[in-house]
Amino acid sequence: MALKYFKREEFACPHCGENHIEQGFVQRLDKARAAAGVPFVINSGYRCKIHNADVGGVESSAHRVGLAADIKTPNSVVRFKILKALLDEGFTRIGVYSEGAGDFIHVDADPRKPAEVCWAK
């Protein structure tokens, strides 16, 4: 299935350029993006071991296995639209991070981790 809203390169590790993002995960994000009607700016997708450590990610991070993305949220209206679309698409692991200009939503589909969870930091 062709992607409408994303290029695979958006999910590459900024440290080394490796990209082991799972295609099915990105296809689901693409569907959510269509439903949201707002851009999904990807801050982080796949991460190599070094980059994951550099950004403070846990060793078992879903980013390491290509099943996670961090999506920039410039304001509360966009944040709501993205959250709603992710939930409607069936994503069940979502974190909301409020760091001023660095606000983002983490979404993952890691089957090794508990489902139906949402956290905020």
Image (cartoon, rainbow, N blue to C red):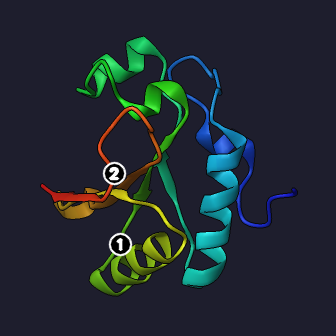
Residue type marked 2: Ala
Residue type marked 1: Pro
Q: Quick check: marks 2 and 1 in contact, CB under 8 Å?
A: no
What residue sits 32% from the left and 59% below the top? 104
Q: Residues within 10 Å of mark 1 (few under 14, many from 20)?
A: some
Placement of 77 over or under 27, stated as above or below: below
Residue, disc 1: 74
Q: Is residue 12 visible?
A: yes
x, y (%) of residue 94? 33, 58
Dot 2: element: loop
x, y (%) of residue 13? 54, 28
x, y (%) of residue 19? 65, 27
Residue, disc 2: 115
Q: Earlier in the sequence, mark 2 or mark 1?
A: 1
Q: Residues within 10 Å of mark 2 (few under 14, many from 20)?
A: some
Q: Is residue 14 visible?
A: no
